Image (spheres, rainbow, N blue to C red):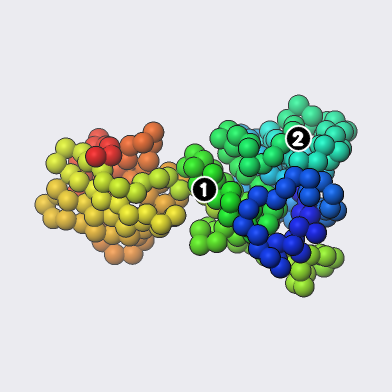
Amino acid sequence: MPIRIALLVFATLFMVARPIPAAYVDEVPFITTPDHVTLAMLELGGVTAQDRLIDLGSGDGRIVITAARLFGASGLGLEIVPDLVARSETSARQAGVADRARFRVQDLFEADLSGASVITMYLLPDVNLQLRPRLLSLAPGTRIVSHDWDMGDWQPDRTVTLPVPDKVVGREKLSRLHLWHVPAPVQGTWCADRFRLNLTQRFQAYHARLDGAARSLEWSGRIQGATLEPPVDGPARPRLTWRDGTLHPAAGSPGLPDGLHFVAC
């Protein structure tokens, strides 16, 4: 999975906050992600045979091919350079995974990402930020793995650092891999019978106030995909699951009867 060296220098110096012209990408060289980093990205993303992976800027196709060959996943690589797509298709056939590893000449800003359970990418800081709203709109629980670059103030759920002695980008001979789980969109007011639940959300973090029980409850927690986890310490608080635009408390949730579900109000 490549990153274009010339674009990296350009972005580092100027941080241009707009899409990179495809014609410019076509003309600059790229470097590949080392095999041990590719493997670590797939392991960090928890890739299995049940996953559909989309690699943004797939280069020579190695991450999609590795996902298919070693993890049994199906994958799609999106790459703007036709020669790289052709090379990837040849490599997939040679690896015997052409039925599960596909590639497409595609501008990643125009691609439909909705079918992915895992997104992998090795792009640039400003490109990550441009993609962030689209990534946040994906199905809750979708896993996103980025090589080196983060998502600004959307903090990763986990970061892994690997030694890369022959790395040519940057001064550190390290690669940082970041993992996010797309959080359910729960900001707002939710109602169920006499109960009223007010939720404020900042990416994975949320704060809740529940009225309508014998006493009001307030707590803060983290959103793990579709699940609003209560705090680990302190008094017991409800665990909620987002499903098809409704919120479902776990059985035995404090202050709430079983079988209740909240809808936006």
Task: Kindly tell me whether residue 95 is visible in this rendering.
Answer: no
Q: Residues within 10 Å of mark 2 (few under 14, many from 20)?
A: some
Residue visible at 37% across and 54% down in the picture: 201
x and y, in percent, of residue 109 in the image: 63, 42
Instruction: Tell me which amino acid carries mark 2.
Output: Val
Q: Dot 2: what SS?
A: strand
Label 2 to label 1, Cα distance in Å?
23 Å
Q: Position of residue 29 (x, y in %)?
A: 85, 53
How many marks are shown on the rendered structure? 2
Residue at mark 2: 105
Give percent across and percent down for residue 218: 24, 59
Relative to 1, say whether 14 is above or below.
below
Answer left or right for 228 relative to 68.
Answer: left
At mark 1, the secondary structure is helix
In the depicted structure, whether residue 77 falls above or below residue 27: above
**The C terminus - image quarter:** top left
Closest to the observer, 142 or 83: 83
Q: Residue at x 36, y 61 (%)?
A: 232
Q: Which residue extends farthest left?
A: 214
Kindly indicate the quadrant of the structure image that contains residue 85.
top right
Is 34 on the left or on the right of 47, as rendered? Answer: right
Residue nearest the observer in this picture, 133 or 46: 133
Judging by the rendered image, the residue that carries numbered circle 1 is 133
Q: Residue 120, image x and y in percent?
A: 66, 47
Q: Residue most toward the top?
A: 99
- Return the disc, 2 or 1, that comes first in the chain's sequence: 2
Mark 1: amino acid: Pro
Return the residue nearer the eye: 166 or 238: 166
